[in-house]
Image (cartoon, grey):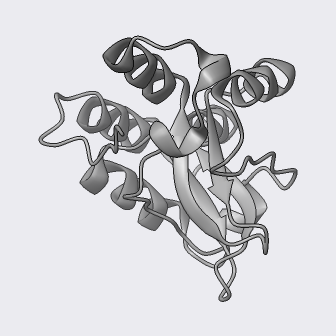
């Protein structure tokens, strides 16, 4: 199965100059914990998570209304393409300890999002099939590796 068959096609994003308050409002509205940060042209430039925002606000002692996404976003971004297999995407998540992958086209525009949760739901759907593409042990291994203590954060705190 290819990433394009499982990814979320409706992508909500933000921009580096958006306030953390507006980013948090989008996360709440769309029930997500991370957003791709895109340039005005729609190219992926970073990722931002709810945790990134809390850590940056705490480190700087400033409220979300006074801070921009650029102060909390992670510039180290790992992606996949829609033609990648799910196992390939799981390997990227494991290698880089991330729970979500932006799916980008050749121009770097975000066209979808793939999460570890998406993979877990697919493994559940395939449970009991004779030749499942995504096995529960694949998801379990990915979750265990992603959940390990990180080596370095790659975060930018202004």
Residue occupying the point 65% across, 88% down: 106
Question: On screen, 39 above or below 20?
Answer: below
Visible in this render: residue 20? yes
Q: Quadrant of the N terminus?
A: bottom right
Question: On screen, 64 above or below 18?
Answer: above
**Residue 81 at x, y percent in the picture:** 60, 75
Judging depth in this view, the residue of 126 and 103 nearest the camera is 103
Where residue 48 sits, quadrant-wise, is: top right
**Residue 95 at x, y percent in the picture:** 26, 55
Residue occupying the point 70% across, 51% down: 15
**Residue 124 at x, y percent in the picture:** 62, 31
Where residue 91 sits, quadrant-wise, is: bottom left
Total labels: the figure holds 0
Where residue 68 sits, quadrant-wise, is: top right
Image position of 28 (left or right of 107): right
Image position of 149 (left or right of 146): left
């Amino acid at each position: 199965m290819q990433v394009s068959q499982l990814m979320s096609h409706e992508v909500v994003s933000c921009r580096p100059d958006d306030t953390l308050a507006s980013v948090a409002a989008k996360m709440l509205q769309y029930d997500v914990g991370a957003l791709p940060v895109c340039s005005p042209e729609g190219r992926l430039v970073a990722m931002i998570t709810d945790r990134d925002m809390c850590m940056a606000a705490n480190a700087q002692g400033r409220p979300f209304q006074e801070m921009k996404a650029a102060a909390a976003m992670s510039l180290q971004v790992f992606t996949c393409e829609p033609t990648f297999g799910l196992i390939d995407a799981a390997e990227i998540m494991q290698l880089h300890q991330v729970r979500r992958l932006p799916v980008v086209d050749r121009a770097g525009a975000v066209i979808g999002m793939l999460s570890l949760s998406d993979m877990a739901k697919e493994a559940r759907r395939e449970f009991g099939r004779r030749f499942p593409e995504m096995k529960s042990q694949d998801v379990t291994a990915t979750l265990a590796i992603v959940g390990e203590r990180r080596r370095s954060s790659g975060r930018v705190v202004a």
